[in-house]
Structure formats: structure tokens, C-alpha cells
Image (spheres, rainbow, N blue to C red):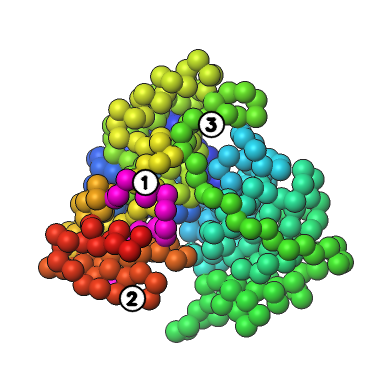
Amino acid sequence: MLRLRVPGGWLPAPSLDSISTAAVRFADGDVQLTSRANLQLRAVATDASGAVAAPLVDEVLSAGLLPHPSHERVRNIVCSPLSGLSGGLTDLRGMTREIDEKLCAAADLAGLPGPFLIALDDGRGDLDAVPADLRVRAVDRQSVQILVGDAAIGPVLPIGRAADLIIELAQAFLPLTGDGDRPVWHVRELPQRGLELFSQVNPGVPGALIRRRTAAPGQRLGRLTQDDGRAVLSALAPLGLLDRRQVAALTRASTLGSGRLVVTPWRGVLVPDLPVSEAGTAAELLIAVGLELDDGSPWQGVTACTGAPRCAHGQGETRSLAGQIVRARWPGTASVGEPVHVVGCSRRCGSPSGAHVEALSTADQVEISRAGRTIAVPIVDAPAAVWGGR
């Protein structure tokens, strides 16, 4: 598997197009979108030493997706996808770039754990459900709150000071990651769940603490209106998979706007900056290749790990089962209840962090877990059983 970081999710459409072409040539043909708004290629061919093909590396470099090889594993930064486009209290795209640049300029931070995550929320609360180690949350146009782990309070400071404080907090965490058999990957694993970092880094804003607000829904689908009057299309990729035709359609749609795309943490893609007169044409391009633009899409909230036979650990097939579950969804339940995640083994890769319904697929049955209760049913009965009791 090859994972490519896209801090904030913003990238030129030709970059995604190049990676899609590489996926057809060197992997299984799909570009996978992750819950951190990154890109993945699976089943990447390697040589006897485990190295990927040199032309694949060249494709990634030419697409601009490997600017800092020494820090590639730690460039995990998510940002509110609509920041600077529509809504939100302030535009955090510049801060996303600033944090990425300062992170990569600090040689020691290449040693951060790979799962370490920084989240930038522009005040709408869309990233509150994303489990982050360090979090920036806008409180007005000029001020942000800094949160560590899952803490509900944190200091408020001018927006121009946030990037430096985030880097200082990451550096304060680094010596606490431990080593040996039980390394610490996240600040919430520390004895004080990350709050001890503030004893080492003084934000210099005494008494400026506010309580975090309630989380807002994540991705809205369909045609949205930007603050400048132009349109942005919000599309969901079923199971977070983009095939060659879908990437070509996204690339073509983007040429009607600014030529840029935004990958979202909800395995979707935004096509921004569309003239209102072109939004309908762009939407038709995406719908024609199976991308979802309807906010009531039955694919909303349904995810799956790779499963057998694509994963060596997979005991059961997951993708077709997820499709059967979607088709069995009762009318009117598209946005009701917890997410559904289909897994092919006990590793449970990609499982949502919050409450959800799990369907564990094995060779001859499916174990469905909901609210602490598990039942086993034949595969043929699994789709209906998933929605039972809703």
C-alpha cells in the first residue's frame, strides 16, 4: 500500500489525474480516499527487495505529492474542507500550509509517530468527530482556540500565533512518545491525556479558556453556494474509491472552475469555484460515473475495509457486501442511525471512532455488532439484519 499525504485536502486536479493513471499502471486501478483526506494506492507492485517501481516514484514526484520525503509519514493535517469557500469563521487554508511548512522544516519532528494528527476547524465544528492529537478551532475571524487530544478546553490566542504553538506542542510531545514494546502514538495516551504539554509550552494567554462547542455534521453533498457567489460541488465516492473514469470526470469538471479539488475526511471530493452557469454541467459529469451528489444517498455512512481477496488478512469479502447493505436500506433511513462499517477480519481496519454498526464478514457468515450486542447470520441475510432494529 502506498499512502500519499495531502495536507488540508487541497490539490490540483492534474495531480489526482496523474496518481490515477499510476494506479492503473502500478496498483489495483483505484485511488482510495482516507479518513484523513489522504490518497492511497493498493496492491502496488514491488520488486524482490520490496521497492516500488522507479517510474511510480517519478509519477508521484511529478504530481507534487512528495515534497518532503523525510517528513512524508508525519504530514497528517486535516482542515475544514469548505474553509475559505463557504461559511466558517475564518479561512484556515493559509495556516494549513504554514503548519505543514514549519513541520517539515523541523528536523526532529520527522520522528513523530505516523498516526499523529493535526486538525484545523474553521469554527463550524465539522472536524470535532475526527480524533486529532492537536486541534485548532476558530472562535472568530482573528482568534483560535488550541486543544490537545480530546480535551474540551484550551487557550485562545491570535490566529497569527497558532502555527508556532502547534509546532511547539508537537515538539513537547516528541520526548514522551516512548520506545520499546509500548510506544505512545497519541497525546490522549499520556497520563494527563495531553494536558501536560501545556506545562512545557506556555501559550502566553493567561486565563483565556473557552469550552469547545457541539460538533456539527460532516460533509454535505450536492451543489453548495460559495461566499463569493460561485458554486462548489460536494461529491461522495462510494467506499472512498475512485476509479479511472471517476477521476477523469472530476478532472474535467474542475476545468470548468479553478482546476483544483479538495479531498474531504469523509471520503468525498469538492469541486470548487464553479461559475453558476457551469455547475449543472459539472454535476452531470460526476453523476454519470457513479459519484454521489444527493445528500440522501444511501452510501452516506457506509464504509468497508479492503477485505478478501485484496487483503492478506481478510477472511471475508467486504465491498460487494457493503453494496448489498446499501441496496437493502429501507426508504427514509439514508441518514438515520449510526454509521455502518464492514470488515473482513478482527483487525477491523478503518473502523469509525464513534458509535457504529459493524458487519464482520467471514467465509460463511456475518457477525453484526450494534450497541454491545452481536448476532451471527448467514451472508444472504446480512443486509436486512444490518438495518433490523433501526
**Real-space CA distance between mark 1 and mark 2, rounded to the nearest whole angstrom:** 24 Å
Assign the magenta stretch its main secondary structure: loop
Disc assigned to residue 373: 2
Residues rendered magenta in the picture: 329-346
**Left or right placement of residue 242 versus residue 141 in this view:** left
**On screen, residue 333 above or below 55:** below
**Left or right placement of residue 116 versus residue 332 in this view:** right
> Pointer 3: what residue?
224
Disc assigned to residue 332: 1
Q: Nearer the viewer, residue 12 or 299?
A: 299
Mark 1 or mark 3: whose residue is earlier in sequence: 3
The residue located at (60%, 56%) in the rendering is 215
The residue located at (86%, 67%) in the rendering is 207
Judging from the image, what secondary structure is the residue with disc 3 in?
Answer: strand
Disc assigned to residue 277: none
Judging from the image, what secondary structure is the residue with disc 1 in?
Answer: loop
Q: Nearer the viewer, mark 1 or mark 2?
A: 1
Judging from the image, what secondary structure is the residue with disc 2 in?
Answer: strand
**Left or right placement of residue 341 versus residue 311 in this view:** right
